Amino acid sequence: RKNFKLNQKVLFENGLETASMERIFSEKGSTGMAQGEVFGRTFGMAVSLGLISKKRLINNQSNVVQWPLNSYWAESVAKTFDWHEKLAENDLKLSEHKERSFEVKYWRWNGWLIRYAEREPGPGDLDFPPLLMVHGFGGSLDQWAGCFSNLSEKFHLFAVDMIGFGHSAKPPLSYSQHLWSQQLCDFGRRVIKRPFFIAGNSIGGYMSMSAAALLGKNWCKGLVLLNSAGRLLTNQEYNEERIKFKGLSVQKATLKGQLPPYSAPPNFLLNALSAIIFFGLQSQITKICRNLYPVRPDLVENGLSEKRDSEDPGALGIFASGAKLPFSSSANELLEHFGGPVLVAQGILDPLNDAKKRSEMFKMAYSNVEAVDIMGGHCPMDEMPE
């Protein structure tokens, strides 16, 4: 319990992730966490560094665990580590022989392997500003491949697989917007290491807004939102929300523990419902993606990577986390905290929402917004990278 106590001296973004875990832990204890999460968070770094043997955990020979249930989840976490380390090794070998518009790399974050792509500028172009590109739910960095070709003469390009997606690790965690935005903040500081622009699609757009709000203008030079997810409020709704939280932003209300109490179903029910949804969607991936790519359905027919990624160990756990998500900050709040320039690029054929209306709402919610329309669907950076 002591590990999840809020600490006001901790960096603000770390505090949000801590607060989201405290919300679960204070109501349910460890039973509210994902199955295997306690072991993964406690010993994950030690396993990744080889201080605890994966082989011994898989063979149930380690004295780290003392009782059968822990042994089962320790073995499961060890197998997840082993799988993604082999996947990373294979990726790096293939990248040496495969002609691509970017170089595949891996970064270890909190012990977990994170895949990212980079295209460095030429020797004479070292002043090119960095641009970090972030995919949406169920997506991967591969959706930005066309942008690597089209933007390489203007930017030092990066794209990242969010933890739980693509070829990145899919550990047993209570995934939240705070976990993902923390990953982006850390990636910017530890990998890019200088101020950068950030572009995000769908939920990746929301995570990009969240990261920009946490980093501020000194680190994030500008924000590009492509068919971004996230709550957009009218001015009246935004003011009413501030009154509801007694003048606090949602971020500060999160830190102070003033969100509604955690009320997700028990884990066994959550996992059962998630499995039904997950396997139902998995069989429909091609059909769903074809609907999201109305201009270039051939991209779907030629094979997207989402089906392969959904078969990785741990992929099911992402869905189970959906019911645990804490109340989210609105786009209004996040952009206000960011304070820098924003480009809203909307694929106006998006079947998931009224893209043109959302463009107008962004402009009403925040003054420093430029909006452009793209004749594409929900993932315009993949359909229309030019």
Image (cartoon, rainbow, N blue to C red):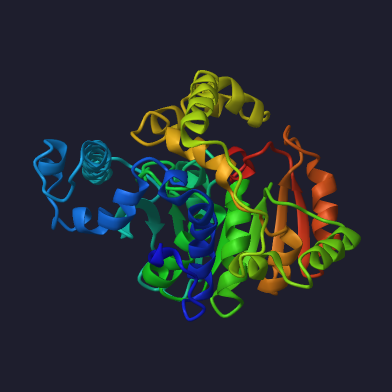
Image spot of residue 44 (x, y percent): 27, 54
- The residue located at (38%, 40%) in the rendering is 35
Regarding residue 105, the answer to whether it shows in the image is no
Tell me if I can see residue 317 in this picture: yes
Is 271 on the left-hand or right-hand side of 89? right
Give the residue drawn at x 55%, y 73%: 215
Q: Is residue 6 above or below residue 384?
A: below
Q: Residue 288's spot in the image, x, y percent?
A: 60, 25
Q: From this viewpoint, which residue is outermost toward the right?
A: 236
Please count the marks in the image. 0
In the rendered image, the vertical position of residue 214 relative to residue 349, given as above or below: below
Q: Measured from the top left, where is residue 328 in percent x and y?
A: 66, 55
Report whether 60 appears left or right of 16: left
Picture coordinates of residue 342 (x, y %)? 70, 65
Residue 80 or residue 363, whichever sits in front: 80
41, 119: nearer the viewer: 41
Rendered position, 49 above or below 319: below
Q: Quadrant of residue 220?
A: bottom right
The quadrant of the image that shows the N terminus is bottom left
Give the residue displayed 18% in from the left and 47% down from the top.
65
